[in-house]
Amino acid sequence: MGSTTKSVLLCLSLAATLVAFGDAGAGAAVRQHVVTEIHTQPGATRFATVTLPSGGPKALAVRQRLPDGARIDVPLGLTVVIASTDAKSTTTLRPDTSFTFVETGAGERSSMAHGSALFSVVHGALNFFQVKYGQTFTASARGTVFSVDTSGRKVTFACKRGAVDVGYAARLQIDEASGPGRATARQSSETSAAAASARSHVVRTVDVITPARTASVSFAADAPTPAKTFRSPTEAQVLYDAQLTLARESGDPERIASALNNRGVLYDDKGDYDRALETFNEAIRLNPLDAVTFYNRADVYYNKLDYKQAIADDDEAIRLDPKFADAYSDRGDAYDLLRNYDRALADYDEAIRLNPSEADFYYNRGITYGNRKDDDRAIADYTTAVRLDPQNVDAFFNRGVMNKRKGDVDKAIADYTAALRVDPAMADGYFYRGLAYSEKNDLDRAIDDYTQSLRLDPSVAAVYEDRGLAYSAKDDRGRALADYETAVRVAPNLPYPYIVRGMAFLYAGPLGRARADFEKAASVDPTNAYAALLVELVDRRSHVPSRLPEAAKRLDMNAWPAPIVRLFLGQSSPAATLAAARNPNPVTERVHVCLANYYTAEYYALQGSKDDAARLYGLAAHDCPDVLQREPARAGLTALGV
């Protein structure tokens, strides 16, 4: 500490040459720094340099005055001591350190790129004194002596006297970590694995170190890996409100901005997006150089479905911190939802390059590969995600969806079972495993899983529908109809509950009940081609004029099942309809051929071609992957007396 004391005394002798530093209430004075000492160790071969904001590096000299924005680079073998603003602070830069004086105001702010330094702050002379390391750590002192060492992958703050607040970035976790969005009700084998991806909030955590508590503390240099955990939102709110009060009292705009960031995170987490935006906007006004706040504001825009603005904020976060892996991943999420899969994958690739041990990045990339129908790469990424994080229930679940989509039902069941081991209260896990068991015609296990899913979440109409279909396949019509009735009651504004219930009446009667359900489905969703086709089947059975030509005006006639619609419009033939069902994806082709067989069987049955109808009903009843498709075909055979 001897050299530090000497430098302080020397600074005092130079005080008359410095511009006076005003109080917090006065106008901002010009901050100046004076080099007081340069110590050269034996064997040193280089000199310290200063790079001014408007020029290149030059040799540093004793008594040289430096403005804000000056960067000092100290090579091995040298130590540099600098006094700032009437010697209110003294900075000792040790060998192999790069340091920049940033700005003044009601206090002093500096930043370190690397190395180690010792800071001495005159008690009560400044409203705040802050030193920052990269985008990750900050230290703020109120009259003390402390040091910062950035060697290795740790940043260590050592406090000699007084107190130092150390601010760093951390992921927020309230109660149990909330997982990314999963696929929800009625998802066919052709849809993507999940509707959302894993996203994290980042808060600014403040730890106060004092010699009375601990003389030093170290943090990993690649934060925000740690989690700042609270038992409840209220617990977090209490701490962050107190943090903001102290920050406002300090007058430190960056500390205030950090506290506002944390409050904005809580508003975002509670879904109060307008207040979150207001709070983040204020934080950015106070500190427009904090990548974390732009990153968090991007999440608010993402939640408000403003993906372009989310991308703009993630762009700024990445510009401010090119190594902010989470910002790349979140920007990839937004690009994915805008269906710019190439840019999404490029962002996930960069996030993984920066942090290859983060399971969520592989999970997110897996979703995009799934959306691109690249199931093998999606499965590979989900596999990596669960290897890195064996508790990643959603990665197991989505891998199951991918395996089911590829037609590997046994692997899908294994994945859903693994997800349920991690989270036994996962209603979707039981539902989707039940669907897989139904495809294997293991109806008792399917019914057990559907029942367990409904016990956990009785609000999903699709589960009642599929349990009803399983009961129907077991010839338990009473329980099947009871489940269909519940599905309609739970989801009266969705078409499929009416379609499924109507199918139960199409063959067993009364036909009027089938007509009412199909018409309701068509009115709920006029773009649903299957509802329009089923109305056509009832109309032909009732010998009334066809309504299909008018309904077809509202359908997408460039997508499946348009070939089936054309068959009933008289614009195509059964052979052409079956040919149109061919698809390069074997799983998709199986579904299309199944539906083509069923509706073409209906077409023949309505024309009185019993043998052709029976043959195609039989193919559908045997080959269709879903009980929703198999059961009507089986009922059609029964109606023919086969």
Image (cartoon, grey):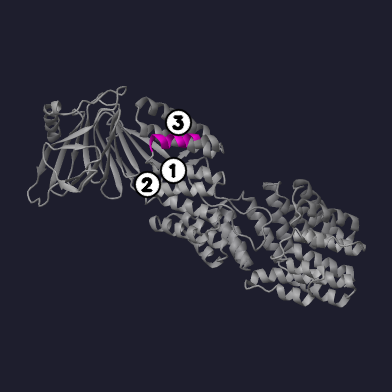
Amino acid type at circle 2 is Leu
Please state if 40 lies on the left or on the right of 462 as rendered: left
Give the residue pinned by disc 1.
294
Q: Which residue range is magenta in the image?
A: 278-287
Task: Name the foreground residue: 231 vs 51.
Answer: 51
Determine the image quadrant of residue 10. top left
Residue 239's disc is: 3
Determine the image quadrant of residue 576. bottom right
Indicate which disc, 3 or 1, sits on the residue closer to the N terminus.
3
Residue 210 on image: x %, y %: 29, 31
Residue 516 on image: x %, y %: 86, 53
Up the image or down, 429 lies above or below 243; here it is below
Residues at marks 2 and 1 touching, judged by CB atoms closer than 8 Å: yes
Give me the C-alpha separation between circle 2 and circle 3. Answer: 28 Å
Residues at marks 3 and 1 touching, judged by CB atoms closer than 8 Å: no
Indicate which disc, 2 or 1, sits on the residue closer to the N terminus.
1
Indicate which disc, 2 or 3, sits on the residue closer to the N terminus.
3
Furthest-left residue in view?
Answer: 42
Up the image or down, 254 lies above or below 632; here it is above
Give the residue pinned by disc 2.
320
Up the image or down, 593 lies above or below 170; here it is below
Amino acid type at circle 3 is Leu
Which quadrant would the N terminus be assigned to in this image? Answer: top left
Which quadrant would the C terminus be assigned to in this image? Answer: bottom right
Residue 286 magenta-highlighted: yes
Residue drawn 18% across the image and 48% down it: 57
Residue drawn 45% across the image and 45% down it: 295
Residue 77 magenta-highlighted: no
Give me the C-alpha separation between circle 3 and circle 1. Answer: 22 Å
